[in-house]
Amino acid sequence: MTVAELAAKIGADVRGDGTQTVSRCGGLEEADEHTVSFLANRRYVKRLKDTKAAAIVLSPGDADRAGERTLLVASEPYFAFREAVVTLHGFRNQPKTGVSDLAVIHETVTLGRNCCVQPFAVIEAGASLGSNCTIYPHCVIGPNVTIGDDCIVYPGVVIYDDTVIGNRVTIHANSVIGEDGFGYATEKGVHHKIPQIGNVVIEDDVEIGAGCAIDRATLGSTVIGTGTKFSNLIAIGHGTKVGPHNLFVAQVGIAGSSKTGSHVAIGGQAGVTGHITIGDRTQIAAKTGVVQNIPADQQWGGYAAMPLDDMKKVAWEVIHLPGLVEEVAQLQKRIQQLERGRDAGTGQSAQ
Amino acid sequence: MTVAELAAKIGADVRGDGTQTVSRCGGLEEADEHTVSFLANRRYVKRLKDTKAAAIVLSPGDADRAGERTLLVASEPYFAFREAVVTLHGFRNQPKTGVSDLAVIHETVTLGRNCCVQPFAVIEAGASLGSNCTIYPHCVIGPNVTIGDDCIVYPGVVIYDDTVIGNRVTIHANSVIGEDGFGYATEKGVHHKIPQIGNVVIEDDVEIGAGCAIDRATLGSTVIGTGTKFSNLIAIGHGTKVGPHNLFVAQVGIAGSSKTGSHVAIGGQAGVTGHITIGDRTQIAAKTGVVQNIPADQQWGGYAAMPLDDMKKVAWEVIHLPGLVEEVAQLQKRIQQLERGRDAGTGQSAQ
Amino acid sequence: MTVAELAAKIGADVRGDGTQTVSRCGGLEEADEHTVSFLANRRYVKRLKDTKAAAIVLSPGDADRAGERTLLVASEPYFAFREAVVTLHGFRNQPKTGVSDLAVIHETVTLGRNCCVQPFAVIEAGASLGSNCTIYPHCVIGPNVTIGDDCIVYPGVVIYDDTVIGNRVTIHANSVIGEDGFGYATEKGVHHKIPQIGNVVIEDDVEIGAGCAIDRATLGSTVIGTGTKFSNLIAIGHGTKVGPHNLFVAQVGIAGSSKTGSHVAIGGQAGVTGHITIGDRTQIAAKTGVVQNIPADQQWGGYAAMPLDDMKKVAWEVIHLPGLVEEVAQLQKRIQQLERGRDAGTGQSAQ
């Protein structure tokens, strides 16, 4: 494929020579003469003169500073580069369809067309899978679980009973969906387990990273909304409703019964306490501790969380505190001198 | 079962009509006319008039504000509702007893009566299980592990060699018990692994969430005390002794050789450094970083941790810092003016 | 083995009677007359008179305070004790070599000499293992994965396609290596997955704890450097390069494209944001949030991270803030009084 042909596919304009053939995507430094590369950050624009890449995807603004290179100019360069990766590399080849003799599938299970069930997977009574699903080794699909079409469940994933999963959902290795929520009623110092009779619902087009744990609800459902993407080692409490098109970075934890709007983004290691609502499009910085409701279209950070502007102000003040203490000590001395002067003056006038 | 019959079973008093039949528990909003519901928070008392629930479990104080509804009044309403859930739903049906032909069980293993060992479970040499245990698929019970009666080990759990587990212990999917502690002796810049020759002891009635990791001790034992409950993705360091009846929320981490008393509660994402002691009944807020010993009956939070009252005071001050800086600047100006007046006065008197 | 024989092996000097036989290592409290113990902290020196241990490993400085005991004096006592544990206990016995009939190994796989592949392990097409590797049950070694010699992969570990692993690498149970990085290009509110065409490279002598998740790179490689050791539940983002001989405590998270030097140490629950560089030998305290580059040989902590000395100063100031506010209020009153005096004086002089 030539640069010009690729440009047409990814919605970019060629600037320079479009006749070079390209066969792969790669970083600026590791690129060869058949590589399409990407300018991730304007700071790196000087590196463009050293890369061997056949063409570089970038924004119109950056293109003007790029020098004599073959460029693929796109108004949304990150998306255009994504299109280039999809075009030249595609997604991971999934294993061939077919059900392994070494899988254990209960006789009551419904399997759609063209599914692949790999060795040592276990699918329990009453479970139902749509078409074109891939179940990797050592997965357990629990009793009465429903999975839609075109889902990929990587090795070691455990899906507890009654979980409902939509279409085009991907779950990475060793994640656990639908384990019991953390519910105990304490009486006389003993914690009595509350049966967790709810379930988990994962809507369409969700991707869950590796090693996550999503609690089933005590009553009703824990929900992960359409198009939402989780990174790794994320913990979601019982009854929490994660909205559509959210992005959660690794090690985020949301306690039970909280709710996020659509397009919420939460940075790594941030936590949200229980019974909290976070509005649409709100962004939460990494490591934030959210302990109150946050309206839509906010950027919050800190612990306890506050608007990011306030947090930056407070952080600045805190760092400059040592100066303030010194300043107050100086003021104190000057006031003492003023007071001595006044008292001396008073003394004189009393003479 | 009628409301009145349920009331007798769960230790609640009926207020209103007790003849309605009930068959399930559910939230206020999703309830139908055969549902027993629960008032989780006094704020929601207004919702009682809209729910279709047959009866609502609540406290005597809330009952007086509840209007014309059938009520199940209990002094410990959360525990009473728990009893209702147990009565009407029970706990998860465990699979039938029996040992799968597809499990691999070493010939030296001792299995108690009525155990269930599911396909692809592996039980290694010298391990011993009590009666009525359920071992789900893909569990590994390592060499010389001892497990008591009535334990449930969900899929994918890995229990390393020499671990000792009591009775009525539940471990959720993909948790790991007894992996090597994080111990290296560094010599000339190289980290040399210290054999971790201790083990993990989990006492009776413990429940461990999904995806946890509990290190074996270097020497002696890491201990999880009777009746303690862990949520998900919790990390416990080598040699740590978690006391009885503790509650740890998701993503808590305790470093090595620390010790908690009885009935300690630790909020999500909180961390405790090594060689720390936390007293009985002390509560640690979510995201707290504990770096010193804490006595009994405390509530601590913050990073580094301090008493919750101090933490709130400090948080308030920090948020109001920008005002303080401005205030000090104003004082500075006023002192300057006072000083100018004094110096001018001095000047006059010098004339 | 006598104390004197052990001393010769571990590079320690005997002080006292070296003829006692020793057979095990243990803590001071649990020791018996055949136990070698270790003084972990000078604070515990008084406990030496109560221990039954045959001999205690300690530093020359501590030896002088140790009273009439048999001592094993070493300039690096922690390393010497490690040598004693290795000598008397050795490392975990690995299972016998041989490939289980119950493992699924693709016909194209290359296995070195003396490997052990346990039941229900799966090794995919094109994978290659060196000599003396142990693959525990329920591991998945993905397509085209390369593993060197003398590696141990504990149960439930999932290694995605194209991962490259060096020699003498140990990976603990249920860790995941090479899952897709967290990369999406958002267009019109929809997050489009970017194929993650890079891989993970784990160099020689690395140990990875339980339940970790190491993302494959979008392009190029995520790298874990020679001799680096991870504790449990650690998340590493795509394209991150962890340097050689690093130590990461449990629940650390590093976002994508960051880079650490050699001998970096990061405390538990600390996080590093993306595109950050941390210099050689720098130490990051537990729970720190790193959001900027840090040069070599630093000790940093806090959130946002700062040098540990500054952090301690700021923490001290913050805790004493309430006093400062009170002090400023007092100054304000004294200034008011001074101002009243001046104005009264002015008034008089105007008469």
Image: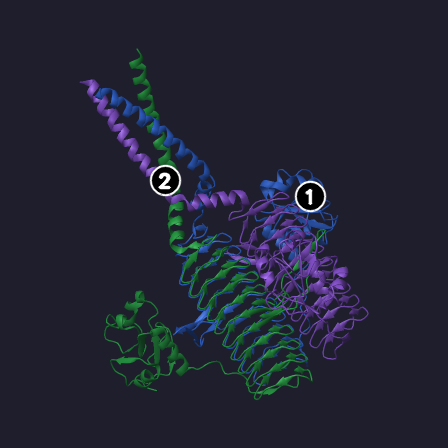
Chain colours: A blue, B green, C purple
What amino acid is found at the position of numbered circle 2 in the picture? Gly
Extreme residue toward the left, this view: C351
The quadrant where residue C30 appears: bottom right
Q: Position of residue A177 (x, y in %)?
A: 53, 70
Residue marked by disc 2: B323
For the point 32% across and 25% down, the residue is: B337
Badge 1 and badge 2 in a common chain: no
Name the chain letter of the residue that bears numbered label 2.
B
The quadrant where residue A290 appears: bottom left
Name the chain letter of the residue that bears numbered label 1.
A
Between A86 and A256, the one lying in front of the other is A256
Q: Point out which mark residue B256 bears.
A: none
Q: Report if residue A130 is visible in the image.
A: yes
Instruction: Determine the CA span between mark 1 and mark 2.
Output: 55 Å
Between A200 and C350, the one lying in front of the other is C350
Against C194, residue B58 (above or below) is below
Between B81 and A133, the one lying in front of the other is B81
Query: Which of the two discs, 1 and 2, sits closer to the camera?
Result: 2
What amino acid is found at the position of numbered circle 1 in the picture? Thr
Residue marked by disc 1: A70
Category of crowding for the residue at label 2, using alpha-carbon neighbours closer than 10 angstroms: few (below 14), some (14–19), many (at least 20): few
Drawn side of residue A218 relative to residue B166, left or right: left
Q: Report if residue C124 is visible in the image.
A: no
Whether label 1 touches label 2, CB < 8 Å: no
Q: Is mark 2 on a helix, strand or loop?
A: helix
